[in-house]
Image (cartoon, rainbow, N blue to C red):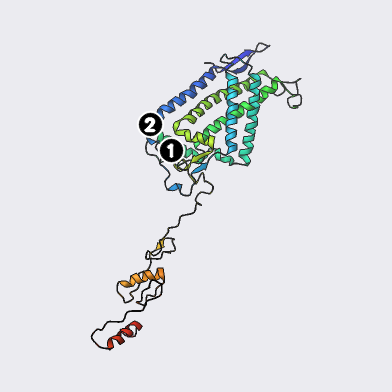
Amino acid sequence: MELWRSAADPWGQDVLIGISWDLMWAAVIVGLGFAAAHAVLAKLLWSAESASTGGGSGAAGLPAQILRHAMSERVFHWAMSVAMLVLLVTAFLPIMGIQFAWVTIHWIAGVALTLMIAYHIVHATFWQDFWAIWVSRADIKTGMAELSHMIGRNGTEVPKAPKYPIDHKMFHHAAAVSSLAAIVTGIFMMLRIDTPSWIPFIGGPAEPYAVFASEGAWGIMYIVHGVSGVALIALVITHIYFAIRPDKWWITKSMIYGFISRDKYVENFDPALWPVPGAGTAPQEEELVPAGVGASVHAGESGAPEAAPEPEDSGYGDSSSDYGRASEVGGLDLGASAGAGESGAPEAAPEPEDSGYGDSSGDDGRASESGDLD
């Protein structure tokens, strides 16, 4: 298999003219082979660990749906995807023998992709967390633990991920490098074909080779452009594979609708690394105590309800607690043995019965009520 193509210039010297088209088929094989190998391993080795752990206690205060991708991010993603697919189709279908007027479509899609990526860089730098997508040392440590767990199944604890896991970040870096390389080289190639006279550092139509004076330098430009193109073939294949996997469909839907569920957030992400705005501020429900159940609830320093104090002995035996509860609910006097009538006014105490000791019983009874005698 050849890696590049060369041809003789007018002076009989071999110069590079581009990559070998064998690399295009190699990229297709690599992309499809990776997808097939991953599908087999996921089926045989990792299916037992695919069960969801559910919401758990970490879901307290979280909304039912959590925003993962804003509308601007989703529009950019799908518009860039269309431009990328148009570029790949117009670049490689003619090589496969399908001929059509591809040049104009190709450079228009290239300009559109350039403008969208320029917008993305500005938007991510000034309106988003620019470093959120870059691989950190913590990501590398998490990735190594996850890889060790998947291969050895040794029970290694894998930390939960930030908003963008390490595999997402690595794909982003690979796609960014390939796209930027294709854009920069594509712009120079386009300007060489039709060089505007108002570009001073190129020199206008009279000097189309002012930047890269030799054919060998332009050959390297073609090589870089071709390598970035075939790399994007493999990246797009793997990206589409993960997007349509059933266990990853919730991520794909978030790029369509913008949201993920609360359970998926708790299961896969670390709230300390991806905090949700407004989480934990939901009002707590108060415990309702039915009136007249016998005890008033007091909140202690810790916020937990304290048990009501035991009522003191009023001298009336067990009936004192009943009167105490009635006192809290209805406002009765514990010191009196009088009960409340139907009208709410206190009834007169009944006359004491004759105990057989003459008139002194009435005096003792009256003294007992006033509290003077033991």
The image position of residue 359, as x and y in percent, is 28, 88
Residue 217, can we see it?
no
Place of residue 353 in the rendered image (x, y in percent of width and height, measured from the top left): 27, 82
Vertical position of residue 176 compared to residue 363: above or below: above
| Quadrant assignment for the C terminus | bottom left
Mark 1, mark 2: which one is toward the viewer? 2
216 sits to left or right of 253: right
Residue 12's place in the image compared with 340, above or below, is above
Residue 45, disc: 2
Helix, strand or loop under label 2: loop
Residue 22 in view of the camera: yes
Verify CB contact (< 8 Å) between mark 1 and mark 2: no
Q: Where is residue 38 in the image (x, y as percent from the top left)?
A: 44, 28
* Left or right: residue 293 compared with residue 359: right
Report the amino acid beneath label 2: Leu
- Residue found at x 56% / y 17%: 21
Q: Residue drawn 55% across and 26% down?
A: 232
Indicate whether 65 appears above or below 358.
above
Corner quadrant of residue 360: bottom left
**As shown in the figure, which amino acid type bears the numbered disc 1?**
Ala
User: Which residue corresponds to the image point at 70% horizontal and 21% vertical from the top-left?
Assistant: 192
In the picture, measured across the screen, residue 22 lies left or right of residue 126, that is left
Residue 251 on image: x %, y %: 49, 35
Q: Nearer the viewer, residue 223 or 161?
A: 161
Please tell me which residue lies in front, 167 or 293. 293
Badge 2: residue crowd in 10 Å (few <14, some 14–19, many ≥20): few
